[in-house]
Amino acid sequence: MNEDARYISIAGVEDGWKVISKMQVRGAPAIAIVGCLSLAVEIYNETFITKQMFKQEIEGKLNYLVSARPTAVNMKLAADDLIGMVNDWVEKSVISVTEIKERFIHEIEAMLEKDISNNMAIGTFGAERILKDVPSGSSLQLLTHCNTGSLATAGYGTALGVIRKIFDQNRLEHVFCTETRPYNQGARLTAYEFVHDKIPATLVLDSMVASLFKSRKIAAVVVGADRVASNGDTANKIGTYQIAVVAKHHAVPFYVAAPSTSIDFEISEGDRIEIEQRPDREMTHIGEHRIAAPGRQRPVTI
């Protein structure tokens, strides 16, 4: 990604599941959109004899897509919404199975436009909130973690959308992005977006955040979310919690920029959020090269 940009063709649900699971697509909003679009592509040329056949296939494949990355809630909520719509349509005898399929595909295509408009709104509201707390006309230095931009959504981004909006208003002095180990989304993706958009930015080590807060006047931290519990607890990329703790110590405002589709009202608090366990190879290797001493495998749940 840091050297070239390539597009991966997705011919159906199995391709969609693989690119999500392998993190070739990541970011909670993008996961939902790519997952649902992979199903739309798969059924586009399929013929269904009965409504019940269509319903069963849709339910099974949407639930399968949810299993690719369980922490990010957007895919699950999208699946629940789409399954609910299909159930309603199936019960209406006046609607044919062909029309149900057409409506289903249209709903998925509409997710693209809705995500971009949501992100633009998040950018506007987020920028207004952050700028409200600083002197009029002053320029800001910000920090972000992981990747929450156009490469994590249908476009513009959530937390990066806030940063883009502040930049567009000529109020951004500088933004710092963490490398975001172990998968390096900050180094590989966020830095890429900043360079592409000519946004003044510096990539910093994950372990530099406390020192950065001490040496620089950081106006705010802005991050995204994989899932938000009904009480406001947030699950995001590993490392977010320690940044929040350090930000509180240094009195730096900490903001989570996320769409309503990232809120799971069925979960009461953060401790109940299912946390995905990634392969240890993502930490011990960079590409095919081992960077950590080999040892015995003892999985530890965090």
Image (cartoon, grey):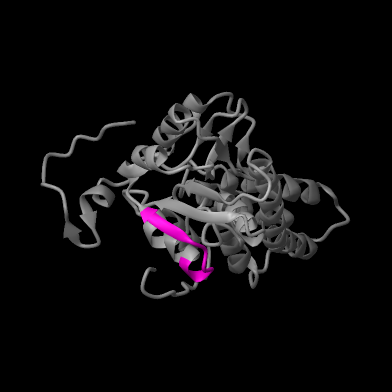
Q: Quadrant of residue 184?
A: bottom left
- Report if residue 291 lies within the magenta region: no
Q: Residue 261, percent across and down? A: 65, 44
Q: Residue 51, percent across and down? A: 73, 55
Task: Depth check: give the residue in front, 132 or 233.
Answer: 132
Task: Depth check: give the residue in front, 224 or 235.
Answer: 224
For residue 35, above or below residue 294: below
Residue 248 visible? The answer is yes
Task: Depth check: give the residue in front, 300 or 42.
Answer: 300
Q: Quadrant of the N terminus?
A: bottom left
Indicate left or right for 165 with 91 as reference: left
The residue drawn where x is 68% and y is 46% is: 136
Residue 49 visible? The answer is no
Indicate left or right for 102 with 134 as reference: right
Task: Depth check: give the residue in front, 302 or 224.
Answer: 224
The residue drawn where x is 56% and y is 62% is: 150
Indicate left or right for 269 with 287 as reference: right
For residue 238, above or below residue 123: above
Q: Residue 101, percent across and down? A: 73, 62
Q: Which residues are magenta?
A: 195-203
Indicate left or right for 20 with 150 as reference: left
For residue 151, above or below residue 146: below
Q: Quadrant of residue 108?
A: bottom right
